[in-house]
Image (cartoon, rainbow, N blue to C red):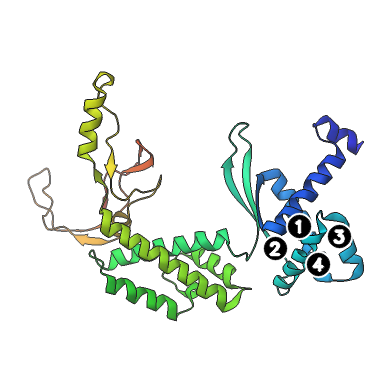
Amino acid sequence: MKGLAFRKLGRSTSHRNHLLRNLVTSLLEHERIVTTVAKAKEASRLAEKMITLGKRGTPTALSSAQSFLFNTGTSMPRLSEMAARYAERPGGYTRVHLMGHRKGDHAPRAVLELVDNPTDVKLDMTARTVAREAYTLLHRAQKNIGWDALQALLQKQASLPIESDTRFHPLTRKNMAKIVRYRGEAARAEFVQKAQQYLERMWAQDQLEGKRRPDTARWDAMELSRPSRGRTLTRPMTGARVHAGELETHVAASVGTEVEEARPIRRRDGTIAPARRTRTSKPSVVRLAKGVFAKRRLRGTTTPVP
């Protein structure tokens, strides 16, 4: 009955088993594969079982792993390496990252990888997040960021346990703690080095390109080359671009700051209200995608502080 159920879906039981064995073997050899979400979840479960058998190390366990894996001449030595790498880790040897949809049939894709591999996606993404948050902290400290201030911040980060720095977001600190929990000082040094590189790259890009501004030359060229189609709806921009739904660094740094208005507010009855302190909130328009904007319910960018 089980085989008949799989034949109805277009894949027999033997075909399914061979497919999963092939995925697990490729994962052990390359430490990262790209497949659909359903296959990634099922292959992740079997890969965890194979690594557990490799850590057990008994003849029976190794024989079971050898009967499951393909290309045993290369997969079994790799299994021994994975068992040595995860000797102190009680479980959780694989990680699944969602990767959009596949072109053609629009199937949801995923990246299945072994944790603590040389090109760990989670380590790279967390390093980028730390660099972006540190750059926002620099913008809040001063508008004109010099190289000396950048180097001072990097030295301060390198001298402290970065996962214990309360200046970063709690979720970011949680991800950093996961990265360095079983890998020790080597992972912490690699993580700090990557964060430094991304932070320096952001600073250099800001110094070279400047803030996001309209590209008037390209705008005029587009109007002259396509006069029959009318004016373009979206003005081309130059400088550092922001991702959809995100704010620019200098705008995000100003959110939450409190200032006292220099000019008192004039009331309708002619009287003048005293000066008040205002807190800068998120702007009333957020960029969703290229040329697409959505309005927030906020009426302005500042709100009075009670």
What's the residue at 25%, 61% (across, down)?
258
State the residue lying farthest toward the bottom. Answer: 159
What's the residue at 50%, 62% (across, down)?
126
Q: Is residue 128 above or below residue 180?
A: above
Residue identifier under label 4: 54
Mark 1 closeness class: few <14, some 14–19, many ≥20 residues within 10 Å:
many
Mark 3 closeness class: few <14, some 14–19, many ≥20 residues within 10 Å:
some
Residue identifier under label 3: 66
Front position in the image: 269 or 296: 296
Decide if residue 128 is in sight here. yes
On the image, the x and y values in percent for residue 9 come to 80, 32
Among numbered discs 4 and 3, the one appearing first in the sequence: 4
On the image, the x and y values in percent for residue 108 come to 62, 40
Residue identifier under label 1: 47
Dot 1 amino acid type: Ala
Front position in the image: 70 or 165: 70
Rendered image quadrant of residue 222: top left
